[in-house]
Amino acid sequence: MKYVEASQFGGPEVLAVKEKQTPEPGEGMLLVEVQAAGINYTDVMARKGFYPAIPKAPFTPGLEFAGVVREVGKGVEGFKTGDTVAAITAMGGGYASHLLTPAATAIPFPKHLDPALAAGVLVQGLTAYLVLDQAQVKSGDAVLITAAAGGVGSLAVQLAKARGAKVIGLASESKFHLVKSLGADHVIDYGKAGWAANASEVTGSQGVQVFLDSIGDLASEAFPLLSQFGRWIVYGIRAGKQNALPAGELSGLIGKNLSLSGFNLGANLQLVPHALQELFKSLIDGSLKVEVSKYPLADARIAHIAFEERKTTGKLVLVP
Ligand SMILES: NC(=O)c1ccc[n+]([C@@H]2O[C@H](COP(=O)([O-])OP(=O)(O)OC[C@H]3O[C@@H](n4cnc5c(N)ncnc54)[C@H](OP(=O)(O)O)[C@@H]3O)[C@@H](O)[C@H]2O)c1
């Protein structure tokens, strides 16, 4: 079998394809032939050594995969050879042609669903779905979404629209067309200083009820846009963008009854089965679109470079 190894923490150059003997599944395990290994921005953080669940190298990146069961270990019930399954592998291992996964955490997906789409709604789809739930987004809310053309962002735009929200997507200018095509009411380039004034123009006196933030810059210009009882949910961190909350904004936090909270998929695993069922349903009926870019397994390094250079949109998958 083939797999990608990060020999140490560092730049994309630490990633290389290796080969080893395909393992046999032990008790309760499945051997899966991977058809699509999802790439997440978190993999970039892990490669750099900033992801707590992967504390040391060498390691194989990859938090999710979709594929076909090739062998079933002793004691496994409910799965057989040839079944299509997807899973989240919180400690990495997904960038591979084959892997062993516990049957207990494998999720069946419909055979006629493209495995790349199934992978596309795992970590990113579940995050978008569940963060909107946590934020209690309802019809009429104005929702501001960072990296709106990205993996989580492009799904959050569509799911927020499906809840009847007014969506303001934040993205690099080259990605405006995509964000609009996903249904966003407005798209703003948050790389330009003073962008919040444009957002304020479109939200007017209503302000922003929910800010979905994958950047983690607490000094963000978005702060004053939040309305009374506004919810700011941070679910990601980007290198070089973390600034502390300015002390002067605290009176706004109190005065407007704002809440600033975090979201982590790993702490919400009990909600995954229902959320995934909904996401698969929306993929099949065509109400949820995932824009997929496929890379051969050997190009994991190239995919990471594109990710870091902000050249990607939607879902990136490795195809072994
Ligand atoms: N808490 C959780 O459980 C959880 C789960 C999944 C993902 N996450 C986090 O959610 C965020 C989104 O993940 P994703 O996989 O969907 O990635 P993504 O948003 O598709 O990441 C790539 C895009 O992010 C934007 N970006 C903004 N600042 C950036 C920077 N400094 N470097 C690189 N890109 C930057 C760029 O779009 P623009 O050019 O348009 O800005 C870029 O194209 C990540 O921070 C990830 O770690 C958290």
Image: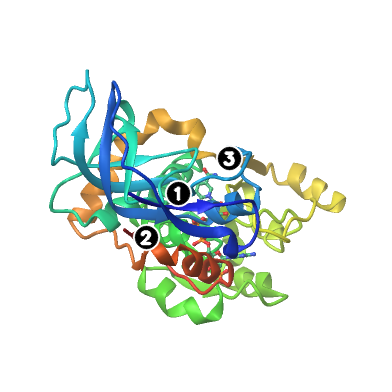
Mark linked to residue 236: none
The earlier-in-sequence mark between 3 and 1 is: 3
Name the residue beneath numbered marker 1.
Answer: 62
Left or right: where 216 falls relative to 27: right
Q: Amino acid at mark 2?
A: Leu
Residue 144 position, x and y percent, is: 54, 60
For image coordinates 24% across by 52% down, the residue present is: 282
Q: Amino acid at mark 3?
A: Ile
Left or right: where 309 falls relative to 137: right
Residue 55 position, x and y percent, is: 63, 38
Q: Quadrant of residue 225?
A: bottom right
Q: Quadrant of residue 27?
A: top left
**Element at label 1:** loop
The earlier-in-sequence mark between 3 and 2 is: 3
For image coordinates 51% across by 71% down, the residue present is: 306
Name the residue beneath numbered marker 3.
Answer: 54
